Every structure is written in C-alpha cells, then in structure tokens.
Amino acid sequence: MSLLAGDPRVLSVGAELFADSVRAQAVTVRTVDWRPPMAGSENDLARVLADPRRSAANSTAVDRMLAVSARLVDVVPAGDLLGLGPSDYLHAGPPIDWDRASGPLRGALIGAALFEGVAASPDDAERVLAAGSSISLAPCHSRSAVGPMAGVVSRSMWMFVIEDEATGRRTYCSLNEGLGKVLRYGAYGPEVLDRLRWMSAVLGPLLQTALRARGPVDVTALLAQMVQMGDEAHNRNRAGTLMFLRELLPALIGSGAPAGDVAEAVRFVAGNDHFFLNLAMPACKLALDAARDVPGSSMVVAMARNGTDFGIQVSGTGDRWFTGPAQVPDGLFLGNYGPADANPDIGDSAITETAGLGGFAMAAAPAIVRFVGGAVADALATTSRMYEITLAEHPTFSIPVLEFRGTPCGIDVTKVVRTGILPQINTGMAGRAAGTGQVGAGLVTPPGSVFADALRALAAAAPAVC
C-alpha cells in the first residue's frame, strides 16, 4: 500500500525523451544511465558475478591496497638495484620488442644507448637495438618499477626507492627530467644527454645524501595533502613537488656539497612541476602490488602503455597482460603540432589512475583542464563517473569540492564490462616520430576489449556453480 502513497515517481532507464515527457506532466523522474554490457560478455559476466570468492577477494584486495604507507627511503643507481647491465633496458607498458616499438619508445632507447656509451651515434644505436642479439628489453613492471611515458631505464640512471613501512615491500622509479625535449618523450639530442649526465653525476648523489641525512619522506602523506591543494598526481604535481622540496631543502643545504651544485639542483626541482610524478607513480604501484594475486578478485592492479599496446593486469589473474591497441589522446597541442603528430598513448603513469588519482581525481584539480583540455565541469563529471566502476573510496585522498569524499579507487573489471564506462586517463602526448619530444597533453581511455578479455580469463578460472 505504501508504494501507492504520495506523489507519483518514475524511474527512467534509456531514452531521455521518455523522461522529458513524464516530467512535463509534473511527475518526479529519476533517470538512470543504463546500457547493456559489452557485446559477447554476458556468459562470462554471469559466471564471474556468481563466483563465491569474488566479494571477499575484492574486499581483501582493496584492504591490502589501502593499508600501504609509502615512504621514500633511498635514491640509488639502477644498475645494482635492478640488476641491469650496460645493454639491459626497461620500458613502460606490457612486453614489446624493437620491431613493434613506437617512435617515442625507439627514441628513448636510442638515447639510453647513447647515454650508456654502447653506441657512438643515433644510427649506430638504432643498428644495435634493431639487431637485438646483444640487448635485453623488459617492462618496468617486471622489476617492481614504473616509468613515465617511454619509461626507459638504463643502468646509470638514478632511481627513487619507495618502501611500505609495515611490510618492507619496495618499488622504484627514475628521476623526472621535466617537460619538452626529454628522453621519456623519445628525444635524444645533445641537450637530453647532457641533462641525463648531470642528473647522474650531481642530482642523484645530492638527493641520496640529503635523504639519508634526513630520513624517509612520507610520500602517502604528501599525496593526501596535494590532492587537497589542487593536484591530481598525474599531470598536475606542483604542490607535491614544492612540498617534497621543502622536506629535503635543509638537508640539501647542509649536505656539504658545493653551493653551486645545491643551487642548481634546487632550481631544477623547483622549476619542474612534474618532479613529484616520479614519486607518486611508485607509491601507487606499491599500493597496487599489495593487492595482487588474490584468487577470484576482479580488481585491476596495473594499467600501462608502451606506445603500441595498452595493457592491464588483474589481481585474480597474476602477471598476465591483457592487451589491445593504444589510442591517441584527445587534447591540447604545443605550437604547430596536431593530432597527426601524436603517438598513441604511452607510459606506466596510468598507475596513478589505477590507484584513484590522475583522471579519477580530476574533481580535486579542476585547473588540470587548462593542460589537458575540456572544462571544469568535465573534471567534476569525470570523477563522478569513475565511482561507477570502482570498488571503494580512498580514505586518504579526499576531494574538498565533493565534501571531502574519497577518490574512486579499485577499478572492477566486472563494473567496466557491465556499464561500458572506461577508466579516464589524463596524459602527456609524445611525438610519433623518434626524437620529437612532447607534442601536447590530453585525455584517453583504454580499449574496452582488454576488460572483456580479462573478464573471460576470470570466468575460465571461476569454480563451477551448481
């Protein structure tokens, strides 16, 4: 009887025309953005949703992710840390070889070969890399590391070491070079190599000395503060960078290093708004690595791109990559560059979105639209939409404009397939041709097929339900 009491109310699913007609009759209407699941996924979806392990498994994965407290504990060269020889290179995204490598990834590998002295010229480097017999390529993710854009790491580059205080688990990332013509965007000119040499000879050792004198830096705490200060930790890291510099500045000044070196290092970090990105990324990976390998969990633990393929990894399917074609971002371009100059999406930096930052936290950083395109309303709408495909709200990363609601985190494969809503990533754009550097920044989503493929694997591993 209570259902018939009061004013009539209507729930409208589908065409807005119906809702508009009912509203015209002064009836309260609530519209629901419903759409059928991805084509061909019905049986897989039913099997995974019926998996008796799924709910508890996802709760476990989320709890493990949220329990991680990331601290910067050291800065060291990659060679000994990651077991890299002169011809061993790590790269962003899922596995790939030279033949399928994109222009910016090739450019970054050429630059790394020149930097390590295994080649005397770009042409010589390309010949060595194309031959393949004397080099080794592996994803950063395979060594507990992440790298922005091309993500190329060679033995002489210095790495941040991030540690979970409770478990001792560690992840790693290189130091950030800045924007424009830099190695991670595929540039390898003399200015790129000179910068890398200075970072190896001066910046890395200075940061190491200062950090060891000061003690660990709480990166998770800095992430929480910067989200409330207007950063989303992917393409906007200004507050995070300056807070990090504040933490290290006394120890840098007291390091005993030449005053000129200290001043140059401070100018470099302070003038590079993206410097903190390379701390945010391994902190996010540390949290998501804790959520790996939970049987039955449908939570995404990595999203990464190598400039050719977009890949995801899921907690319940181990280290297996589910890949599809990387897409070209839609956004703003530098100078005279345009869409034809942009390479498809590249980089491990979507680990920030996977952890509930980046595109998922755009409501906290509306100014980001001036860098990637769109309007402030788009930033708010993006974060609101991401709640539809996630398992939790992050208790540490809260958004002031949403009454301090936690950012959406824990992407659920089943929710992506059921709704058709794809994770939103904001990203830089590298030039399609090797050696170009950065050409713009914008927004991109993964290919939907990778989530359907991951769902199929989860369905195959699900126990039979009578």
Image: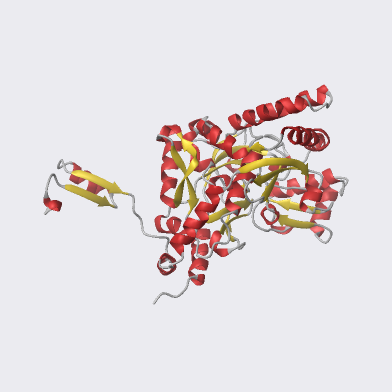
Where residue 180 sits, quadrant-wise, is top right
Question: Could you tell me residue 142's position as x and y percent?
Answer: 69, 57
Q: Nearer the viewer, residue 135 or 440?
A: 135
Q: Is residue 276 left or right of residue 361?
A: right
The relative height of residue 335 versus residue 13 in the rendered view (above or below) is above
The relative height of residue 355 versus residue 441 in the rendered view (above or below) is below
Q: Nearer the viewer, residue 42 or 142?
A: 142
Question: Could you tell me residue 137's position as x and y percent?
Answer: 75, 56
Question: Could you tell me residue 279's position as x and y percent?
Answer: 65, 40
Q: Which corner quadrant holds the N terminus?
A: bottom left
Q: Is residue 254 left or right of residue 420?
A: right
The relative height of residue 265 versus residue 80 in the rendered view (above or below) is above
The relative height of residue 113 versus residue 321 in the rendered view (above or below) is above
Q: Is residue 172 left or right of residue 222?
A: right
So how many labels did they put on this image?
Answer: 0
State whether residue 300 appears in this view.
yes
Q: Which corner quadrant holds the C terminus?
A: bottom left
The residue most toward the bottom is 466
Question: Could you tell me residue 347's position as x and y percent?
Answer: 63, 47
State whether residue 430 appears in this view.
no
Residue drawn at x 78%, y 43% is: 76
Colour theme: secondary structure
The residue most toward the front is 166
